[in-house]
Image (cartoon, grey):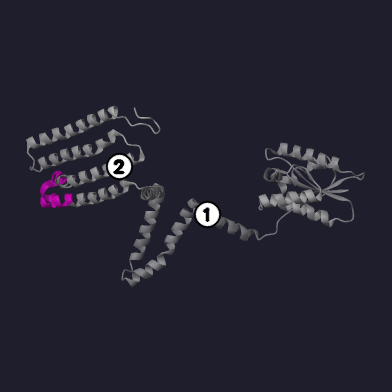
Amino acid sequence: MLLVLCVDLDDDLGRKTGFETPVIGRESVERAATALATADPEDSDVNVLFAGLHLYDDIEDEQVEVAAVTGTAKSDVAANRKVGDEVDTVLASLTTGEDVRALVVTDGAQDESVLPVIRSRVPIDGVRRVVVRQAQSLESMYYTLKQVLSDPETRGTILVPLGILLLIYPIAILGDALGLPGSTLGVVSALLGLYLLFRGLGLEQTIDRSAERIRQSLYGGRVQLVTYVVALAMLSVAGFSGLQSVEELGGIEAVGVAGALAGATFGAVQWLAAGGIIASLGRITDEYLSGGFRWRYLNAPFYVAAIALVLFALSGFFLARVSLSELAGALAGGTLIGVVSTLAFAVAEQRFPRRSEGEAPQ
């Protein structure tokens, strides 16, 4: 009697389909093969099972049986022992008085390592290794490209520089049309330089996180997004106002570096303070709406105002626009604003503590 023995050393059949092994008989092996093909069409053991069925159907001149035995994914020794035990079970189930010989079907050299274990239990007439016919080089190239395109890290490393280099020709045509034939090298160099800086500093992750926060702010009704845009606009105005103040003084050549710094501060501090107060009010509003408000958060606009008062007076004093007594008053006023706001909101936080969600009021 010939036993067509399909070997699955790492037990893909049992792990992926739940079939109890060994599987004995043509119908049982066919159901197991179909179940494994459904669970994992790319598993090579599917081909082993169907190849065993094909051999079973082709052999007509003698009594034949087909069975599938499995090992385990833990280790080679444990897998070989389990295969040996299942071969014993298969042999015990065969009701025949003839000598049993085996035709072993595997999918590679790893499964064939169990052949000595099988040979110790039943003579082996032959070994059939199942190799799927395919265009290996073409398929390997296809899957390599597919993996490159699906991996964000590899895609950004390879495709972005390649895309920038491919832009050389259209940029050259555009530069020639605009009368700027020498702009191609500069544009491509700038693109490559920016890309290398972003990759080297890891800024792409920062940009992605910032874009995600902006998107959440837009759809989450966060006032902070609007106040930050206004604060950024005021920051731009502050820079312009500072430069204009320095120009009114005659420029850096006339007043020196220290005078220019004082002039820029004197001209910009009001706008900077307004932007800081607006940004802090947006943050306070969002914290209140989200239930995370604390009294101490109200200190922020007062601190900004106090710092702005001190910087305005100090820079004005260096420019001879603020007297010494006015400077002293501004320093005292800024300190007083900071201290009083801190104490006031600390007392408010103690007297009116924020209740946790679901907690009953006192």
SS assignment at label 1: helix
- For disc 2, the neighbor class at 10 Å (few under 14, some 14 to 19, many from 20) is some
Q: Please rate how many residues cluster around mark 1, counting C-alpha atoms within 10 Å: few if below 14, some from 14 to 19, many from 20.
A: few
Tell me which residue sits at (68%, 40%) in the image. 73
Is 26 left or right of 226, judged from the image as shown?
A: right
The residue that appears at 37% across and 68% down in the rendered structure is: 172
Q: Report the amino acid beneath label 2.
A: Thr
78 horizontally vs 221: left or right: right
| In the image: residue 201, left or right of residue 312 | right
| Residue highlighted by disc 1 | 150
Q: CA distance from mark 1 to mark 2?
A: 42 Å
Q: Nearer the viewer, residue 293 or 339?
A: 293
The magenta stretch is 241-262
Disc 1 and disc 2 in contact, CB within 8 angstroms: no
Q: What is the x, y in percent for residue 67?
A: 80, 47
Q: Which mark is residue 285?
A: 2
Question: Which quarter of the picture shows residue 335?
Answer: top left
